[in-house]
Structures are given as structure tokens and as C-alpha cells.
Image: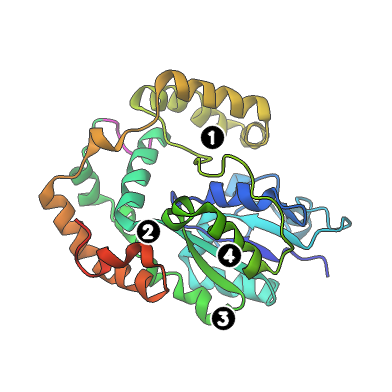
Amino acid sequence: MNRVNLFIIGVNKAGTSWLYYLLNHHPDVFMADAKELYYFGDEGPNEERPESLEAYHRHFPFDQNYRYFGDATVMYYKSAATADEIQDYNPDAKILAIVRDPIQRLLSQFRYNKQLGLIDEATSLSEALSNRRYLIDTSHYEETLPAYAGRFGADQFKVVSLEAGRADPGAFWAGLLHFLDLPHAPRPEADDQPENPTGSPAFRAVYRSTVRPLRRCFPWAYRWLLGSTVARQAKLALLRLLGKASAKTEALSPEMEAQLREEFAPTYTYLHDLGLEVYARASAGKGD
């Protein structure tokens, strides 16, 4: 059956690019050359969405001998209706979600939204949170991911952790192979580095004036850039020159951190109940 059978459904700014990178280096896995296909659900830019199932399938060489054909689109996690669409499309698919400490994920998305021009560079975190509830909602994994757990079950749906992967890359890789029932393959090198880092304010200004207009006006060219080794090397060189975003420059006040700890108490409990012990201290209220 010519169907995509592996989905990375999110979560945004929690390590999906890193997970995509890892899986794409296994010889039995083909991840679509274009990350973020937006085919299922109604999230994401319409101009980048395949216009038909045939167009969607053109991203995958089904005539080749791969065990998995994978689609990594972070917007898929958001809706139970999207889970239904994917289940209807392929009820035997494997589903992966990657999570991150909910507060750190929120901060990363806040900085990344500045890079995208969705939040003004001068806007503080408290100002952003006052009128952009989605920054908080995205980190409430317990409100979205159970839709996939209920439809696909433990054998087909797995939540993994960015922090756990960084703490023990070998065990993380072995866990992925076990879940996907894949033969052993060497863990990709440099897999402790993020594949889609957010830049410093200077880098973000360059990004907003170049890449964002290109994506808006010429989405096909933007798609080409995403798969271009030369473009990626240029981006990394610019990041080295101008710097990456620093959490220290946008540190939380004790009051804000306490508010967010309270906000995400159910989230930490959910993660702990999944067996992700890396979040155990936070779920017990000792994460400061």
C-alpha cells in the first residue's frame, strides 16, 4: 500500500527538526524532502499545502524499498480532527510527538516568533503572553496529545523528550529504533545540536528582511531553500557570525516563572505520568 506510515506531529519548537534529522539518517526511513507538508488538518499556509493526495504522494518514492515513509509537520498535533484524518488515511501509521520543558518551549517559540516577524522585536514576554494565548496553549501537551494516544494506542503512538534525548542520545536512539522495530544503525553524528535554532536579534532582523518575504511571495523558492545544502550552510555561517538567541538575555523574573510553573502544573504531571522522568522534579513542584 503506497501510504505514508510515519508521522512526526510536533510539538513546535520542541525538537522536531532534530528528530526529523535523526530518522532521516536511518537507511530504512525516508523522510519527505520538504519538512512541514501541511497536508492534513487546516493549520499552516495554504500556498505550501499539496493541492491533492497525488501531489502529497509525490514527496515520497513509494517504489523504493524503505520500511517507513515519513511526514514531519508540527501543526498536526493541534487538533483531534487532524488525528482522525491521519487515522482514516492510514490506521496502521506510527506517530511520534516530541516534547520539551513547557516553559523552555514557550520561550523558544517567543523568540522564534520575533524572528518570523509575528512578534515585534521590542515586545517583552509579559506583553506577548497577555494577548497571545497560543504561546501558552502550545505547551499544554496534555490537552492535545491524548487525541493521538486514544486513536492509535501505545504500539503506534509515542511521546519522546528533547531533554531526555540530549541527556542520553544513545538510549534515545535505541528507543526510537525499538518503537519503530527498525534494525540497528549507527546513531547520526552531531545529533545533540538543534537543526532549526533561533538567531540573535541581529540574525532575526536579517531573516525578516530576506527569508520571510521570499516565503510569502515565492513559496516554491522557499521550499527549495529548505532542501538546499548551500542555503543551510549559509544560514549556519550567519548564525556563527551574528549569534544564536540567548535565554540569558530574556530570563524569566521569579514572579513570571512561578506563574508559569503553576500554569503548567498539569502538563508536568502528564509528562511524568508518561514515564518521562526528566520532568519529575518539576511535576513535584521542585523544578525551580
Whether pointer 2 and pointer 3 mark residues with C-beta atoms closer than 8 Å, the reply is: no
Q: Residues within 10 Å of mark 4 (few under 14, many from 20)?
A: some
Circle 1 — which element? helix
Q: Looking at the rendering, which quadrant does residue 286 occupy?
A: bottom left
**N-term mark: 2 or 1:** 2
Residue 30 position (above or below residue 34): below
| Front tag of 1 and 3 | 3
Where is residue 143 drawn, in percent x and y? 37, 71
Residue 133 position (above or below residue 227): below
| Front tag of 4 and 2 | 4
Tell me the kind of residue under disc 1. Arg
- Pointer 1 residue: 216
Circle 2 — which element? loop
- Horizontal side of residue 10 vs 52, given as left or right: left
Whether pointer 1 and pointer 4 mark residues with C-beta atoms closer than 8 Å, the reply is: no
Which labelled disc corresponds to residue 138? 2
Can residue 132 be spotted in the picture?
yes
Where is residue 254 drawn, in percent x and y? 12, 49
Q: Which residues are magenta?
A: 117-121
- Horizontal side of residue 256 vs 35, given as left or right: left
**N-term mark: 1 or 3:** 3
Question: How much space separates mark 2 and mark 3, taking CA atoms?
Answer: 22 Å
Q: Residues within 10 Å of mark 2 (few under 14, many from 20)?
A: many
- Pointer 3 residue: 153
| Front tag of 2 and 3 | 3
Quadrant where the image shows the N terminus: bottom right
**N-term mark: 1 or 4:** 4
Question: How much space separates mark 1 and mark 3, taking CA atoms?
Answer: 38 Å
